[in-house]
Amino acid sequence: MMRPIFVVLKSALFFQQMSALTLPSKNLSSATGNSPGCSTIQYGDQSFSVGFFSRDKLTISAADVFPSFLFGCGQNNQGLFGNTAGLLGVGRNALSIVSQTAPKYGKYFSYCLPSTSSKTGHLTLGKSRALTRVNFTPLDRSQGTSFYFIDIVSISVGGRQLPIRHSVFQTAGGIIDSGTVITRLHPAAYSAMSAAFRKLMSKYPIARAYSILDTCYDLSGHTSVSIPTISFTFAGNVKLHLDPTGILVAVAKLRLCLAFAGNSDASSVAIFGNTQQKTFEVVYDVGAGKVGFAAAGCK
């Protein structure tokens, strides 16, 4: 069930703030992907929100108060939002919480997504956490202002690097995105990954595909499963050995699928999604132009 919608016209203060608000259209277009973009935002999975754009005081703690925080108030929300109360924008555009709180936190934040819903993760704004063993890869700041572009160098399955030319990863580039669930790859890269994974999982029965996931297994007759390792290498020789929960995703009882999908065409950008980020401390130092990873980040 969706949470109750905030009735803006019953709030004199909200309506007053909304009516008096002016903002350069380029900031709105960058944040929403629309022009003029002040009333609608649509996401990559076709979910969308239509509503009002306004501002109010944001209080994170007694010491961290932002008097003129800009945000959208959705009135018609359709798609894969579930029972969430809202979405927190942490992109590079001027309207994200990262940019609006930059005077306090310096465009620096980190998070860890836990392996299961029963475990605890975190989101930290600023450098308040003592972080060690973080390996950083550069952010490519030449490709727009909203997304975090990174350079995928190679992918390995079962400890062996896949025979994928680096030019394949450079065709449309790649981004890291906390809001995308399943990692999307260039068709050639996904084909190589799927073939290698299927070969190493050949002793397990194939199951029917599920939505965009086409490499699935029926594990009902197995008490234990040997999952092939998958690792990514990013620019700067940053290697990520994925947690098992970032490799297979359960779509039904004892029916699991490879948690990756191929893009429909080679011109679509690759997306390193949040399933593959599970258990890592992911550190964004936007001011320094880099994003880093550390193992066991949720501890």
Image (tube, rainbow, N blue to C red):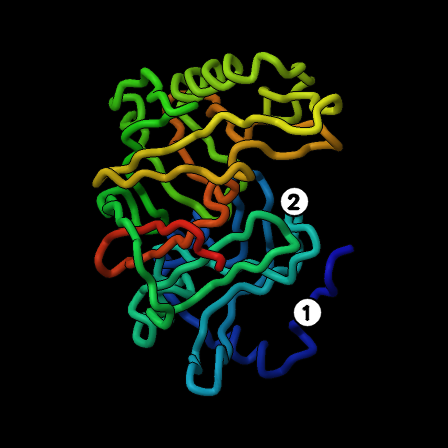
- Please determine whether, in this image, residue 100 is positioned above or below residue 182: below
**Image location of residue 162, percent across then percent down:** 35, 19
Local SS, label 1: loop
Residue sitting at x 45%, y 38%: 242
Q: Count up the numbered dots.
A: 2
- Please determine whether, in this image, residue 217 is positioned above or below residue 280: above
Type of amino acid at the residue the image marks with label 2: Gly
Q: Is residue 279 left or right of residue 83?
A: left
Q: Quadrant of residue 225?
A: top right
**Image location of residue 17, percent across then percent down:** 51, 78
- Please determine whether, in this image, residue 63 is positioned above or below residue 154: below
Residue sitting at x 48%, y 14%: 195
Disc marking residue 79: 2
Q: Nearer the viewer, residue 299 or 73?
A: 299
Local SS, label 2: loop
Crowding around mark 2 (Cα neighbors within 10 Å: few <14, some 14 to 19, many 20+) is few
Which residue is identified by label 1?
6
